[in-house]
Image (cartoon, grey):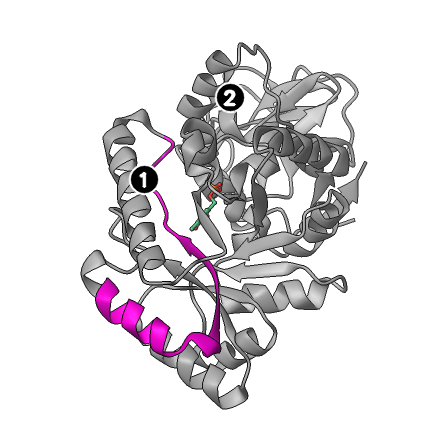
Amino acid sequence: MPASVIELSLSALQNNIAFLKKQFENTKISSVVKANAYGHGLKQFLIMAVECGIDHFSVFSSDEARKIKSCLKKPVDIMIMGWINDEDLEWVISNQIDFFVFNHDRVDKFLEISKRIGIPAKIHIELETGMNRTGFHYRELNRLIKKLNENKQYFEFKGICTHFAGAESIANYKRIHDQIKKFKSLHKRFLKNYLIPETRHTACSAAALSYPKTQFDMVRIGILQYGFWPSVETYIQFLSHNNMQKDPLKQILSWKSVIMSLKKVKTGEFISYGTSYLAQKDIKIALIPVGYSQGYARNLSNQGRVIIHGQRVGVIGVVNMNMLIADVTTVEKVSIGDEVVLIGKQGDISINVSSFTELSDQLNYELLTRLPVEISRVITK
Ligand SMILES: *Cc1c(COP(=O)(O)O)cnc(C)c1O
């Protein structure tokens, strides 16, 4: 048995996808699986998502697109939202993979290749609407529109899109509204010039829920499908608007390990490196073979919680590179090899990433995506 395993619940994903389909009834869902499917494990997640009826996936880079191609036999739509190695662009176009085009450099490169190999590229023009990240500024549009109109046979105009600068916080309300307005007016510029995109897509999870008019023809959903909310604000707002009491999502990931060793420590002794934990009484400790190199954040030292024998117990001392220590004084009949839940449920007790992340001061996104690829992922019911 490995030091820890990540279990992925198929029924939780089915629940989440059903929820999303109900929320976004008239809109296509693209499942965002960048960063190793938010740390869940790309291959296992893809298998599950396809089983749930998903057929469109968004990634950040061309190497992630290659991984999808190698994991899945069934043909699915793939869209690259960011980085493409120069050497990969021809592969992307000849494999009919959709990709974002956000500057003239990429226009020139894809046109050169499409002309040479005689396969039209499937492009999504990304527009700058106020985030000031990637995307064509309106001042660049005349030149872009001219180029596109002169080369119409070399591409399929699959979409126009943009990305919002922080839809998960109400503090950005005005900025998001300005972005929506700008997007609509820039879309019209294309139509007036006889360039008609097949789809308009702008929304990530937070925008799709909090600003329904951003849903357009497709939504790009990452965090929600994994059972997490983009922010506490988005969560509270959703519940109150829908008169709900209970979280409709289920976290699909559990992270489990086992007790590697047990020991009794006398009052007055320090535990682990340094002096951050002093035993105030005689205690019993369990060593667990997971540390910060496996994604268990160091700032959970003396703060984290794990579940052993259906009981929540504290992490004591500093989290080491490959080990952490739990206080099991109150747990009866513990033995080596017993299950330890780092994230997830045991009986009625659960440790979820949100309670984790408040402690470790990381966003859900960050903790998840830092779970190392080396940990094995197993699909469960
Ligand atoms: C990551 C990403 C998304 C998905 O964001 P979530 O908040 O996880 O739903 C959507 N669009 C773009 C461009 C992204 O980079």
Residue 322 appears in the rendering: no
Q: Is residue 310 above or below residue 114?
A: above
Seen from the viewer's position, the closer of residues 215 and 184 is 184
Write the start and end of the magenta stretch as one range. Answer: 141-168
The answer to which quarter of the image holds residue 181 is top left
Separation of disc 2 and disc 1 at Cα?
57 Å
Outermost residue, left direction? 139
Residue 127 colored magenta? no
Residue 45 appears in the rendering: yes
Numbered mark located on residue 180 in the image: 1
Q: Is residue 228 above or below residue 43?
A: above
Instruction: Determine crowd level at label 2: few under 14, some 14-19, many 20+ residues with C-alpha closer than 10 A.
Output: some
Outermost residue, bottom direction? 116
Residue sitting at x 34%, y 51%: 187
Q: Is residue 364 above or below residue 199?
A: above
Horizontal side, residue 237 vs residue 183: left or right: right
Amino acid bearing label 1: Ile
Q: Which element type, helix, strand or loop, lies under badge 1?
A: helix
Q: Which residue is mark 2?
A: 279
User: CB of residue at label 1: within 8 Å of ligand 1?
Assistant: no
Q: Position of residue 152 (x, y in %)?
A: 43, 75
Q: Are marks 2 and 1 in contact (CB under 8 Å)?
A: no
